[in-house]
Image: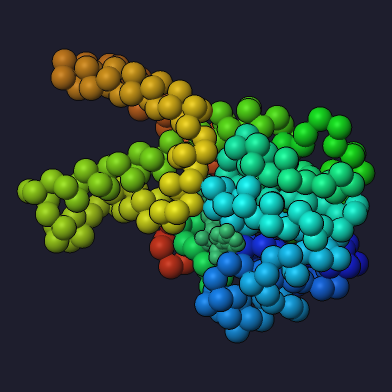
Amino acid sequence: MTEPQFEKIALVGIGLIGSSLARVIRREGLAKHIAISTRSAATLKRAEELGLGDSYSTDAKEAVRDADLVIVSVPVGSSGAVAEEIAPALKQGAILTDVGSTKGSVIAQMAPHVPAGVHFIPGHPLAGTEKSGPDAGFADLFENRWCIFTPLPGTDPAALEKLSSFWRACGSNVDVMDAEHHDRVLAIVSHLPHIIAYNIVGTASDLEEVAEGEVIKYAASGFRDFTRLAASDPTMWRDVCLHNKDAILEMLARFSEDLAYLQKAVRWGDGEKLFDLFTRTRAVRRSIIEAGQEVDVPDFGRQVVAHPPKS
Ligand SMILES: NC(=O)c1ccc[n+]([C@@H]2O[C@H](COP(=O)([O-])OP(=O)(O)OC[C@H]3O[C@@H](n4cnc5c(N)ncnc54)[C@H](O)[C@@H]3O)[C@@H](O)[C@H]2O)c1
Ligand SMILES: O=C(O)C(=O)C[C@]1(C(=O)O)C=C[C@@H](O)C=C1
């Protein structure tokens, strides 16, 4: 437990990320009061049953009133509407942040609504699972993971440091970059892997000779790894695709070229090319593991590569 960093933190959106934040804020004693708001009354009720906060409302304005830190954790396509809704109730001097997987679009949607005197600092914790909703969150989610900020020009350094210190207290390492760079990096390391997973699982389930029953019955562990990603929340990933379109299309074009190269190597029986590529990619996996640590996720037996522990 540390000293509370904030009198009141408001969480708008209480799914996987919002509820993980609520749990770690409570565990670490980072706020005297946690106010929770979400659009759906059923989700809010569940959050209350789980005891995630101190006050609950479907009215986001009510939740953010007097809050020193407001964290918006909704699908990226809803961030503009949420910013517009809460703007009139934000306290002067408050920090407003988000956790969205895309940053350029979130800034374009939210920034125009942010009143003068409120510190808007976009953020993105690189931590998650394929699950969603308030039951899916857990306090350790952000432990040894990166949280990236994409501050706008003129951001108050003291506010950025205060938010960084909050995320460090949640267990994360923090980094700063511009939104465009963030969106290109995340397109290759996160968005493309999900699109590829959705595609391969879709193709397999479309193939008549491996009709559903056989896909399930004979799913080898490589395919199972893809099904985990392909089980991720459809709303969240629809929004990511729609809101990071340019970077995703750029990376998909590059990916398709490389796939064609691989296809040619298979067609022409070019074992040397295949062996060289597979050797190079194995080295990438090894260096990720050497730089970080492996975490077992009990209910799926999967391994997640986390980032290096904090020094
Ligand atoms: N799931 C991940 O792995 C992951 C990781 C990092 C960042 N993110 C980002 O975090 C955000 C939330 O993702 P999640 O995984 O927690 O999703 P989730 O589906 O688990 O939760 C979303 C929450 O937002 C609420 N919501 C939706 N529209 C709303 C609106 N208009 N107003 C108020 N509340 C609304 C839902 O009721 C729910 O409580 C997304 O922007 C996502 O891109 C997700
Ligand atoms: O591990 C997973 O299941 C995730 O999808 C987490 C993941 C990722 O791609 O690494 C997904 C989206 C985010 O914005 C950040 C993290």
Depth check: give the residue in front, 86 or 230. Answer: 86
Q: Residue furthest bottom?
A: 49
Name the spot of residue 272 as percent of width and height, x first. 27, 16
Question: In the rendered view, does 1 fall on the left or right side of 289?
Answer: right
Is any atom of residue 277 visible in this view?
no
Tell how many labels: 0
Q: Residue furthest left?
A: 209
The foreground one among 22 and 259 is: 22
Q: Is residue 92 above or below residue 178?
A: below
Position of residue 271 measured from the top left corner of the image (x, y, whole percent): 23, 19
Q: What residue is rendered at 58% in x and 67% in y?
A: 39
Tell me which residue sits at (74%, 78%) in the image.
55
Q: Quarter-wise, where is residue 54 in the image?
A: bottom right
Q: Position of residue 86 (x, y in %)?
A: 73, 58
Q: Nearer the viewer, residue 129 or 112?
A: 112
Query: Which image quarter is the N terminus in?
Result: bottom right
Q: Position of residue 142 (x, y in %)?
A: 65, 56
The residue positioned 79% from the left and 57% from the top of the image is: 88
Q: Residue at x 92, y 44 (%)?
A: 158
- In the rendered structure, the answer to whether residue 136 lies left or right of residue 1 reads left
